[in-house]
Image: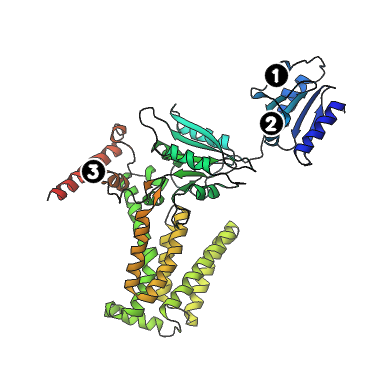
């Protein structure tokens, strides 16, 4: 190696605090190429950089070298410390002796996986492709859906140590600006953290109320759902190295809407959403009502139902509250164990474990048959929620609701329900009311939510199903208006 290559190697190792992994390739006494192992495309390096620059000692300027390199993303830099971040990110540095600065050549090839099927948000209808950890691939997937010139990609830097970058993705209209973009810009600009590894960590920093149990923004791994959110005026935050994107602002009802609803007819989609609403009520209130009725309100239980309840509980040594808590904790243990085990083993564990533990608990007198059925229905109700974060919140809320029912009966359930409703009514997501369109009430938004028609009416001109949806919307709107006049 020449004196120049030795000097460059010493400087780079000093800037990298002695870290290994850097390669210094001396092409001549005055020309050096430096890169990090495992971060570059070796074929591009050999064909488009090394093969074109080797064997020539007559270079006098960086412009001459730049013209020889057959890679478009080739930029000059002034000082070596300015190019360290690009070197770590997979760029190659081309340095010429007795010339200030050098060139950064983009030959990065960060290890990543190819797009695969969506595992978390799997559906029966529609595309199955999911995002990967490569931001460039993810944005390309979105541009395949949204080919409009109004589709804007805006990059920001988030962390100081990991130098994590993020992209704000939204539709920009000169006549109607997106009201949430500027708010997100300010929050992103004010959040300077040491390191950022995953999108869920950044999601907490963007939230209006980070101490709330209810999620304000959603994570998605599906390009079709993300593209739909952008078309609806929402803003997507995509973090480099993460296969899930952040979508906001979201209302409470958005967490109960599935991508599959839009691929179905309006009737099937509406039925599925009503079914999830019923499942929400069952999941939160079914077990607490059982505990409150058996503890304080025997007189409210019909006589035909009271006898089987007494028969099923006469061997149970615990009060209803303790019995319900034991079963709820058992269900959560089975769910957590099934989620942490490999897929096939986890499914077997959940089914076999539930049957064995339930049957053994009844025979041992730890619980009653009726409570096992109610707890199973409540668990199924929470699993119908399409969004995992909201599903986890519902399962958590069930425990304080059980305690309120066991301590105060139905008044406790009413008090805790009122507390949750007040909290939800006060929440916002990027400044948008969290309970919209329920509060503030919006009749048109409510109809769109019920009938799964998030688009404007002018877009439904050739689709017969959509036209029928518009006719039904008009009839329901007229019915609401007539009811208000009466």
Q: Is 412 left or right of 197, judged from the image as shown?
A: left
Is 12 drawn above or below residue 59 in the view shown? below
Disc 3 from disc 2: Cα separation: 62 Å
Say if residue 2 shows up in the picture.
no
Circle 1 or circle 3, nearest the eye: 1
Name the foreground residue: 393 vs 336.
393
Residue 472's tag is 3
Badge 1 local density, few (<14 within 10 Å), some, or many (20+)?
Answer: many
Is 155 drawn above or below residue 219 in the view shown? above
Q: Residue at x 55, y 59 (%)?
A: 339
Name the foreground residue: 405 vs 159.
159
Q: Secondary structure at mark 2?
A: helix
Badge 3 local density, few (<14 within 10 Å), some, or many (20+)?
Answer: some
Find disc 2 in the rendering and name its residue.
82
Find disc 1 in the rendering and name its residue.
66
Is 405 drawn above or below residue 463 in the view shown? below
Disc 2 from disc 1: Cα separation: 18 Å
In the rendered image, residue 319, in percent from the top left (x then y), is placed at 42, 81
In the rendered image, residue 266, in percent from the top left (x then y), is placed at 31, 45
Sequence-first tag of 1 and 3: 1
Tags 1 and 3 touching, CB below 8 Å:
no
Q: Quarter of the image containing the N terminus?
A: top right
Q: Is 185 left or right of 84, judged from the image as shown?
A: left
Circle 3 or circle 2, nearest the eye: 2
Sequence-first tag of 3 and 2: 2
Say if residue 97 shows up in the picture.
yes
In the rendered image, residue 98, in percent from the top left (x then y), is placed at 80, 20
Is 244 drawn above or below residue 95 in the view shown? below
Q: Residue at x 77, y 34 (%)?
A: 12
């Amino acid at each position: 190696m020449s004196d120049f290559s030795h000097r460059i190697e010493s400087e780079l190792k000093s800037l990298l605090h002695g870290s290994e992994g850097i390669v210094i390739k001396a092409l001549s006494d005055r020309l050096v190429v430096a890169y990090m192992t495992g971060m570059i495309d070796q074929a591009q390096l050999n064909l488009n950089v090394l093969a074109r620059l080797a064997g020539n000692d007559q270079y006098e300027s960086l412009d001459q070298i730049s013209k020889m390199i057959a890679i478009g993303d080739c930029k000059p830099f002034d000082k070596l410390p300015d190019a360290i971040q690009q070197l770590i990110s997979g760029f190659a540095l081309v340095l010429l002796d007795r010339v200030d600065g050098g060139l950064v050549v983009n030959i990065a090839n960060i290890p990543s996986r190819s797009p695969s099927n969506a595992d978390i948000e799997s559906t029966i209808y529609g595309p199955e492709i999911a995002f990967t950890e490569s931001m460039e691939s993810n944005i390309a997937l979105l541009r395949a859906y949204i080919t409009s010139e109004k589709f804007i990609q805006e990059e920001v830097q988030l962390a100081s140590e990991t130098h994590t970058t993020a992209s704000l993705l939204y539709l920009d209209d000169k006549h109607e600006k997106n009201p949430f973009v500027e708010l997100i810009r300010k929050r992103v600009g004010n959040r300077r953290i040491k390191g950022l590894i995953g999108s869920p960590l950044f999601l907490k920093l963007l939230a209006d109320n980070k101490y709330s149990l209810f999620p304000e923004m959603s994570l998605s791994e599906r390009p079709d759902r993300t593209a739909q959110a952008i078309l609806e005026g929402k803003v997507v935050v995509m973090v480099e190295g993460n296969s899930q994107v952040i979508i906001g602002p979201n209302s409470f009802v958005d967490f109960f809407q599935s991508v599959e609803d839009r691929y179905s007819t309006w009737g099937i989609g509406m039925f599925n959403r009503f079914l999830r609403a019923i499942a929400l009520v069952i999941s939160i209130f079914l077990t607490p009502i059982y505990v409150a009725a058996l503890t304080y309100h025997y007189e409210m239980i019909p006589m035909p139902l009271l006898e089987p309840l007494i028969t099923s509980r006469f061997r149970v040594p615990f009060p209803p509250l303790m019995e319900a808590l034991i079963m709820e904790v058992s269900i959560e243990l089975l769910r957590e164990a099934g989620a942490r085990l490999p897929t096939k083993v986890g499914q077997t564990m959940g089914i076999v474990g539930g049957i064995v533990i339930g049957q053994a608990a009844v025979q041992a007198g730890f619980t009653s048959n009726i409570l096992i059925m109610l707890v199973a229905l409540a668990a199924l109700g929470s699993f119908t929620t399409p969004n995992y974060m909201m599903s986890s919140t519902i399962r958590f809320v069930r425990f304080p609701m059980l305690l309120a029912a066991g301590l105060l009966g139905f008044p406790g359930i009413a008090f805790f329900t009122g507390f949750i409703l007040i909290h939800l009514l006060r929440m916002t997501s990027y400044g948008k009311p969290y309970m919209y369109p329920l509060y503030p009430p919006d009749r048109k938004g409510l109809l769109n939510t019920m009938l799964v028609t998030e688009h404007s009416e002018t877009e439904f001109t050739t689709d017969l199903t959509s036209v029928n949806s518009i006719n039904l919307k008009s009839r329901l709107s007229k019915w609401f208006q007539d009811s208000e006049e009466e």
